[in-house]
Amino acid sequence: MTAAYKRTRGTTARTRPEPTGRAAPAGSGVTLPSPTWLLERILYRDGLILIVDKPAGVPVHAGPGGGINLEHYFEALRFGLPDPPALAHRLDRDTSGCLVLGRHRKALARLGRLFAGGSVEKVYWAIVAGAPPRPEGRIELALKKRSEVRGWWMQVDAQGQPAVTDYRVLGQAEGIAWLECRPRTGRTHQIRVHCAALDCPILGDPIYGDKAAAANGIRLHLHARAISLPLYPKRPPITVSALPPPHMLAALQRCGYRPEDDPAVGTGSAVAGAPAAMSP
């Protein structure tokens, strides 16, 4: 384990500061430093995979216009292998948290089968405006593209692809609620559209929520809290949690989140077999 990503168990919960230095895409509110900054955000590493804590505001790969993105920094994550790792799945630019990388072709093929087969358990935290009608439930609303021009904009449509999200309320405060969301399918913007369909859009969502709030600098309050991968048939699943990003802390604490009690504290050991807890 190198000092670059070693953490100490039992310390007070703190989110790491967002990286500073080189500019990220315009309007993201995030800047990126040296080519090795991503080392400090490694949550798990073994011979097949890496799990990193993606910061909000950074796209995982280059868009049509190019620009700085997370893949730009994967060269620093080779750890002796001939090629850098590659994305096993994706997170939206403004979503933070657990992101899985495959370290070589065979690993990516295995991960692809797990994701495609629905074997990967994903947990997201969201702060929403208002609250869902019940403290927990399942949202089953098919989704399709709003238009072919902006294919990543989605809408509820009975003729679309099946999409299922389980949710439960973890806490509430005046005007907002803290949700745990577990997507059972992997559609684009699934959690964001499903929350909006319940009349409780995610705080800071400029597409499906309050556009004025987003325009006033409120960032998307959606965090890929944890992921569990049954990667090795004869071993327990690899389960890793990521601390919430700084911009979500105030709303989370209003809803009852206590950083000092967060089980993600001290996780992120680079040693295989020492994963984080999935509990909220």
Image (tube, rainbow, N blue to C red):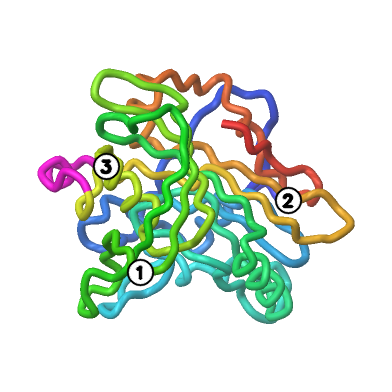
Q: CA distance from mark 2 to mark 3?
A: 31 Å
The numbered mark at residue 238 is 2
Element on which disc 2 rests: strand
| Residue 194 horizontal/vertical position (percent) | 35, 49
Upstream in sequence: badge 1 or badge 2: 1
Where are the magenta residues, as a range? 209-219
**In front: label 1 or label 2:** 1
- Asked if residue 202 lies in the magenta stretch, the reply is no
Name the residue beneath numbered marker 3. 201
Foreground pick, 47 / 154: 154
The correct choice, above or below, for 74 with respect to 260 in the image is: below
**In front: label 2 or label 3:** 3
| Residue 181 horizontal/vertical position (percent) | 47, 42
Q: Quadrant of the C terminus?
A: top right
Quarter of the view holding residue 200: top left
Q: Residues within 10 Å of mark 2 (few under 14, many from 20)?
A: some
**In front: label 3 or label 1:** 1
Q: Residue at x 26, y 44 (%)?
A: 219
Residue type at the position of mark 2: Ile
Q: Residues within 10 Å of mark 1 (few under 14, many from 20)?
A: some
The reply to whether discs 1 and 2 touch (Cβ–Cβ < 8 Å) is no
Foreground pick, 144 / 59: 144
Element on which disc 3 rests: loop
Residue type at the position of mark 1: Gly
Upstream in sequence: badge 2 or badge 3: 3
* Count of numbered labels shown in the rendering: 3
The numbered mark at residue 160 is 1
Q: Residue at x 24, y 24 (%)?
A: 175
